[in-house]
Amino acid sequence: MPRNHHKNAEEKVLEIIKRNLKGTETIVIGVSGGPDSVFLLNCFLKFKSHHKKLNIIVAHVNHMLRGKEAEEDMKFVESLCKKNAIQFELEKIDVEALSKTTKSSVEESGREIRYNFFEKLFKEFKADFCITAHHSDDNLETILLNLIRGASVKGLAGMKISTKKKSGLRIFRPLLCVSKEEIMDFMNSKKIKYRIDRSNMDTTITRNFLRHKVIPVIKTLNPNLSQTVLKNAKTFEDLHNYIHLEAQKWIRKHRDAKKSYHIKSFTPLPLALKKQIILTIYQEMVGETKNIENKHVEEVIEVIERNIGGKKKKLGRYIVEIKQGRFIFSK
């Protein structure tokens, strides 16, 4: 049984915060007004009550998708900030219009807007962390979605409590130690007000379909699904860390001045290592491997192993090209 099993959600999260923060940092917290993000803000306000030098900036994005409800969410979060004397920063963008322009989904466009806003505030306020309200159920959904989409080992490891992007943005997710149920139990027992986003019940959205239709059915086979999957995720994380280290070693050893790689040195490697080498090279250039699926990497490896000069294969934002027995990533 976990050591902190008897503790409520706030106590568990405060333990994580104290372990990772000194209390003198500048932090940007994403607050939508929903129960998860309001709970997150509540935890940091509790932490701030004992660490006066902590500087909290609240970031709220109005996606303009739900008309009056979205406006009320915005006013609710702004009111919370005024009440607690903390800075409120707003980004108001028509996500639906943007998604049509960029030809991406509303969910993808919304995510991009949020993280761009985080990037902006992180730099503007010279922040130490941007804090998101992802909890253990979000992590479970992410892992299952990655499995369904054919993600790499890294994707099956799920979200980490702390990550650093190529831009320098540092994301901290202190709620990964608690479930949605624990958060709701705490919020309701303390009678803390929050907003409800009814679009979270729309099962035409893939994540919502998984949350409301698929996971409950799987839990009839394994009631401890969350713990099982998250425990396996730790194994995948350990595996990824090891193979990533091996990939970095190979890249450093075999990369030439033109940043190309010898195919004869690549071909005999185990398939798992080849995949990680391709992903690591890509990540070093782009900063992430989002939307790069396992099948895409396998197609690139197939082209490399054929070793036919002039052959090319697209991978995300780059082209992998074969030149004189070597492969190179180019725009």
Image (tube, helix red, strand yellow):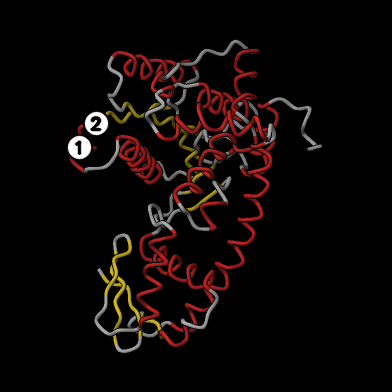
| Residue at 40 percent of width and 53 percent of height | 290
Looking at the rendered structure, the number of numbered marks drawn on it comes to 2
At label 2, counting other C-alpha atoms closer than 10 Å, the crowd grade (few under 14, some 14-19, many 20 or more) is: some
Q: Is residue 234 above or below residue 44?
A: below
Q: Residue at x 41, y 65 (%)?
A: 297
Side of 65 relative to 223 (left or right): left
Residue 216 vs residue 143, the one in the foreground: 216
- How far across and down, in percent of the image, does residue 232 sit? 66, 49
Disc 2 is placed on an element classified as helix
Point out residue 291 in the picture as x, y percentages from the top left corner. 38, 52
Mark 1 closeness class: few <14, some 14–19, many ≥20 residues within 10 Å: few
Which three-letter amino acid code belongs to the residue tagged 2?
Answer: Glu
Q: Nearer the viewer, residue 159 or 61?
A: 159
Q: Is residue 128 left or right of residue 331?
A: right
Q: Are marks 2 and 1 in contact (CB under 8 Å)?
A: yes
Residue at the (55%, 40%) spot, across then down: 139
Residue 215 appears left or right of 18: left
Q: Name the spot of residue 121 as percent of width and height, x first.
A: 37, 40
Specify the quadrant of the image occupied by residue 115.
Answer: top left
Quadrant hosting residue 153? bottom right
Report helix, strand or loop for mark 1: helix
Q: Amino acid at mark 1?
A: Lys
Q: Residue under label 1, please give it.
A: 100
Q: Which residue is mark 2?
A: 96
Above or below: residue 12 compared with residue 161: above
Relative to 323, is 240 on the left or the right?
A: right
Q: Nearer the viewer, residue 298 or 322?
A: 298
Inter-mark Cα distance, 2 to 1: 7 Å
The residue positioned 53% from the left and 72% from the top of the image is 273
Q: Please state which of residues 140 and 9 is positioned toward the viewer in this rendering.
A: 140
